[in-house]
Image: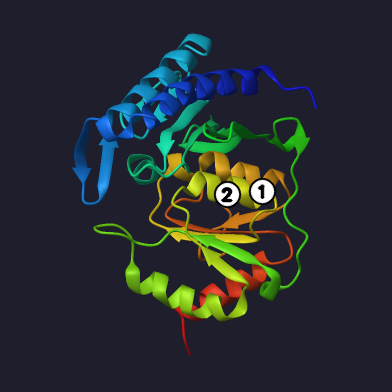
Amino acid sequence: MAISGLIRIMEKAARKAGQRLRRDFGEVEHLQVSRKGPADFVSKADQAAERTIYDELRAARPDWGFLLEEAGEIPGDPGKPRWVIDPLDGTSNFLHGIPHFAVSIAAQEPRLDGKGWGDVIAGLVYQPITDESFWAEKSRGAWLQDARLRVSARRYLDESLIATGIPFAGAGNPAEWVAIYTAMAPQVAGIRRFGAASLDLAWLAAGRYEGFWESGLKPWDTAAGCLLVREAGGFVTDWRGQSQPICDAQVLAGNDALHSRLHKLLVGALNPR
């Protein structure tokens, strides 16, 4: 598959930011860190990565808008797509010296009726430490570098690994999470919490996980990952089973065989008889 110009633009920006993140990760003890909220830190590295990505993408597509984790929404031409960007997903891992974090960039189209935003047309999740670039384009499949991705072929829950994000101080719904975990854990081979939703979804697309659930996320956490899973043959919905262009407040993702079974477990956990 020839890599399109759009993906090349995204990858150039992600790799440039990733270069700086790798350098800062090596000096993590010396980073200046400021409090952004309860258990939610933002580092100079995070801000610098976002600025690097913004400058690269603005130069390539000057009329596109942005939705950025740190800087918020920056409008562009309303008839053109926008970029949805998390410059450093897994900030807590990064600040603790844990080498599991990513840059996430997605391109999202405006709706044809002009009311809000529609499909994600391209997404890229780049892991600077492993130098893995997961990318997808609408109707063109999902890829890791130049290798086609396909969700896992596992068909049984007791063979499956499920990823999640656990609520932490000031974020998430612990009671909801415990109910879902209690329903799922006895049915599956294992549950993993690695701390970067974009990589959880990219790994699901690559067949490393069979499922993923989390609530309370933001569009920049999942925009690229949702497209990766779908283009790799999986499904991403909210708790009701509805497929949104970007599932963030509620995310349930799974391979094509197990998503419906995971959804049944989740619904049963949240609506006990």
Give the residue displayed 55% in from the left and 75% down from the top: 184
| Residue 174 image-quadrant placement | bottom left
The kind of secondary structure element at disc 2 is helix
Mark number displayed over residue 201: 2
Mark number displayed over residue 205: 1
How far is mark 1 from mark 2, CA to CA?
A: 6 Å
The amino acid on which the numbered mark 2 sits, given as a three-letter code, is Leu
* Residue situated in front as seen by the camera: 236 or 29: 29
Q: Position of residue 242 (x, y in %)?
A: 57, 59
Residue 195 falls left or right of residue 44? right
Q: Position of residue 153 (x, y in %)?
A: 78, 60
98 relative to 4, above or below: below
The amino acid on which the numbered mark 1 sits, given as a three-letter code, is Ala
Give the residue displayed 39% in from the left and 32% down from the top: 25
Q: Which colour scheme is used?
A: rainbow
Give the residue displayed 54% in from the left and 60% down from the top: 163
The N terminus sits in image quarter: top right
| Residue 36 image-quadrant placement | top left
Q: Are marks 1 and 2 in contact (CB under 8 Å)?
A: yes
Label 2, residues with CA under 10 Å away: few <14, some 14-19, many ≥20: many
The kind of secondary structure element at disc 1 is helix
* Residue situated in front as seen by the camera: 64 or 110: 64
* Residue situated in front as seen by the camera: 20 or 273: 20
Q: Can residue 122 be seen in this view?
A: no
Residue 180 falls left or right of residue 97? right
Q: Position of residue 185 (x, y in %)?
A: 54, 76
